Each structure stands twice: as C-alpha cells, then as structure tokens.
C-alpha cells in the first residue's frame, strides 16, 4: 500500500478527513475447532463478477462472489493500488484455492458457498446497512469464521 504522503492530493485529502469510529464493546464468540470451521472471505478489493455493475467511488454496497467464480474484475478506484499481484494470482485477495485445499485436507470443515467484496475506499460508517446484510447471509450459510482481506 502506498504511504499517505505519496498519494495524489485528492486521495490524501479524502483519507485525512475520515473520522475514526468509536468501537463498541467487542462481541466475541467462543472459538470453533478448526475441523468445524465454515470459512467465508470478505475483501475490500472491489472485486465483482465480469458483467456485474462495477463499484463506484464511495460505494456502500457489496458484491457476492460464489466460491467457484474465477472470471472476476476489480473496479477499485484507488489509482495508487498496485493490482499486479491479484492479476497474477487471485488468491492474493481471495484465497479460494488455498481454502479449498485446507477443506480437502480437513484443516478446516468447509468453505462457504458465497464470499463478499466491498469498495475499500468507502467510509465504513456509511456501510453499516450492507455489512449487516452480509452478516445475515453468512449466518444463514452457517459461516462461523471470516477471513477479512483488506486492500
């Protein structure tokens, strides 16, 4: 990731105006044994399936990505973000192949059917509604472990 001082003025200005949210009390849950974990991925890389509506600047919504989807595009607005790694290996931002390997070798219980992508440039406070929708979907899919992949 680029240093703040090296960012273009528009990005630097936007980030410097963000306010840190006040965290509430933690909502910890008892850990689940690795063999019983159902894992989902949440990424802020603004990735979506080819042909879907691209993410826009300050997007507050999310995209659902099936675990077998591989024809993906990134519409992240940050011009300073280096996309080289993910163009060479999707697993750098969505480690689907690694998770499948872990499930096959019984290191984890299973991989969720759906995973989620957000636009990392958006203000998290404004994304609450979308985050709550994703939480509900993950609960329905019995996900009990989430890999948060920030970009």
Image (cartoon, rainbow, N blue to C red):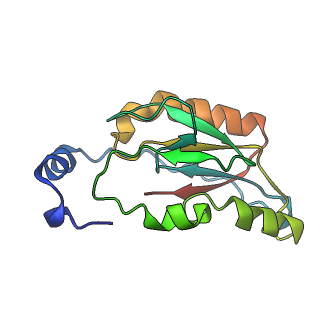
Q: Relative to 91, is 24 above or below?
A: above
* Res 139 → quadrant: top right
Q: Is residue 138 left or right of residue 120?
A: right
Q: Which quadrant of the rendered structure holds the N terminus?
A: bottom left
Q: Residue at x 78, y 39 (%)?
A: 141
Q: Position of residue 62 (x, y in %)?
A: 52, 35
Residue 33 visible from this viewpoint: no
* Res 60 → quadrant: top left
Q: Residue at x 59, y 29 (%)?
A: 133
* Res 31 → quadrant: bottom right
Q: Is residue 137 left or right of residue 34?
A: left
Residue 114 visible from this viewpoint: yes
Q: Residue at x 70, y 46 (%)?
A: 69
Q: Position of residue 129 (x, y in %)?
A: 49, 27
Q: Relative to 30, is 3 above or below?
A: below
Q: Position of residue 45 (x, y in %)?
A: 47, 51
């Amino acid at each position: 990731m680029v240093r703040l001082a090296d960012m273009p003025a528009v990005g630097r200005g936007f980030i410097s105006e963000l306010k840190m949210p006040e965290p509430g009390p933690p909502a910890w849950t008892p850990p689940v044994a690795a063999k019983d974990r159902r894992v989902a991925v949440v990424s802020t890389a603004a990735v979506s399936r080819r042909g879907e509506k691209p993410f826009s600047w300050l997007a507050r919504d999310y995209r659902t990505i099936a675990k077998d989807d591989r024809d993906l595009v990134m519409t992240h607005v940050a011009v300073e973000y280096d996309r080289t790694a993910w163009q060479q290996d999707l697993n750098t931002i969505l480690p689907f192949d690694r998770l499948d390997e872990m499930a096959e070798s019984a290191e984890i219980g299973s991989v969720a059917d759906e995973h989620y992508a957000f636009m990392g440039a958006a203000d998290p406070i404004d994304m609450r509604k979308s985050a709550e929708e994703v939480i509900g979907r993950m609960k329905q899919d019995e996900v009990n472990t989430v890999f948060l992949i920030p970009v």
